Image: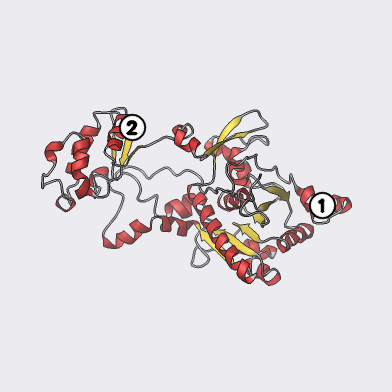
Amino acid sequence: MDMMKPLEGLNVVELATFVAGPTCARALADWGAEVIKVESPSGDPIRYIGGNTKFPTLPDENPNYDMNNMGKKAIALNLKSAGGLKIMDQLLQNCDVFVTNNRTKALEKMGLSYEQIKEKYPHVIFAQVLGYGEKGPLKDKPGFDFTAYYARGGLLGTLYEAGTSPLNPVPGFGDNQVAMNLVSGILAALYRKNKTGLGDKVTVSLYHTAIFALNTAITAAQYGFSYPITRKETGNPFLNTYKTNDGRWLQLAAPEYDRLFPVVMKAIGREDLIGNEEYCKLKNISGQSGKVVEIIEAKIAQKSADEWAELFAQCDIPCEKALLWDEILKDEQAWENDYLFELHYPTGNVRTHVTLPVKFDSIGKQEYSKGPLVGENSIEILKSMGYSEEEIHQLTEEKAIV
């Protein structure tokens, strides 16, 4: 017997492009909501930029678009036309949640800002992705994860080996975090709505998401904690990376340095240092942790990553080989937990995608299909709203819909 998904009966309208807003709405769709994606006649730009990450951008195989838009219905509206705006207004009248990443000024021009929607439809939860926030000098600046998240958010200027160049960002990293943060806010607003009948305004910005993710480091900066550093300067040598003899990197994660010093020294074959006051206390190596790093480094360089992973596992010391993306595609741990799934494309190709990072017993293993084409469900949606064939034809002639 099919189980009911947690958000069945929820109606969502999405007016969003690229990653964060659409991924938020995709999560709601995965969990049972009916999501109507509203696009311009030319479609969400993410349909056409997959080449940046070597994706195909074919109508029948467009994974860069699909991973953010599975499970939705799509309608294409010209929101510069009276007919298009009227349909949008009707969609909002009957929805529970409106998800957008449009900038506020653009929404105001279309009559779709929070204040304008709240006045007409106080039951609607207005969920907006922002670049930098609602206030301040950057409130109207366009935000992308490369700029608002990575750069201004404190990752780009800090999380790299001192003396080298900044890390190379990949698209969607910050956006996906924003998406799930926005989902959590929407769910809290729905809980309130169930009690009051009223909607709310929920906003999440790329900039805020980044500094929240880095809150330990940003707060610690007041006490002199700063990056970038070299691996030789790390405060705790057991929270560090080491290169193995097969050219791979290991990440150790043993924050209790004093307690675990004997365990780590035994694991790497340096029992002679156990009890050595120069090295066995974190306070004693302050400012000169590089000495311990070099001791560990020399030993780690003598074995392969897999050998060390096994040795540290036997000692119950958290350690992982730094996996590459193509290795994750084949990782048994990911497949056993349904973190990955296969999507069959009309092209005949079978491609691996990633599931959402939240699992429900009531949903179990899901079946997925690719995202809708531009305006694929326009006629179906309009008919469900009471539009006749003649009216739909007229709207098409007026270029109000595609």
Amino acid at the residue labelled 1: Lys
Residue occupying the point 11% across, 47% down: 278
Residue 366, above or below 331:
below
x, y percent for residue 209: 46, 57
**Foreground of the two, 41 or 311:** 311
Q: Residue furthest front?
A: 1
| Disc sitting over residue 383 in the figure | 1
| Disc sitting over residue 248 in the figure | 2
Residue occupying the point 51% across, 56% down: 181
**Foreground of the two, 90 or 50:** 90
Amino acid at the residue labelled 2: Arg
x, y percent for residue 243: 29, 34
Residue occupying the point 79% across, 48% down: 379
Q: Residues within 10 Å of mark 1 (few under 14, many from 20)?
A: few
Image quarter of residue 78: bottom right
The alpha-carbon separation of the residues under discs 1 and 2 comes to: 58 Å
Residue 47, above or below 392:
above
Q: Is residue 153 left or right of residue 73?
A: left
Element carrying mark 2:
loop
x, y percent for residue 106: 63, 61
**Foreground of the two, 341 or 380:** 341
| Disc sitting over residue 306 in the figure | none
Residue occupying the point 62% across, 53% down: 16
Q: Residues within 10 Å of mark 2 (few under 14, many from 20)?
A: some
Q: Is residue 247 left or right of residue 390?
A: left
x, y percent for residue 42: 69, 46
Element carrying mark 1:
helix
- Colour basis: secondary structure
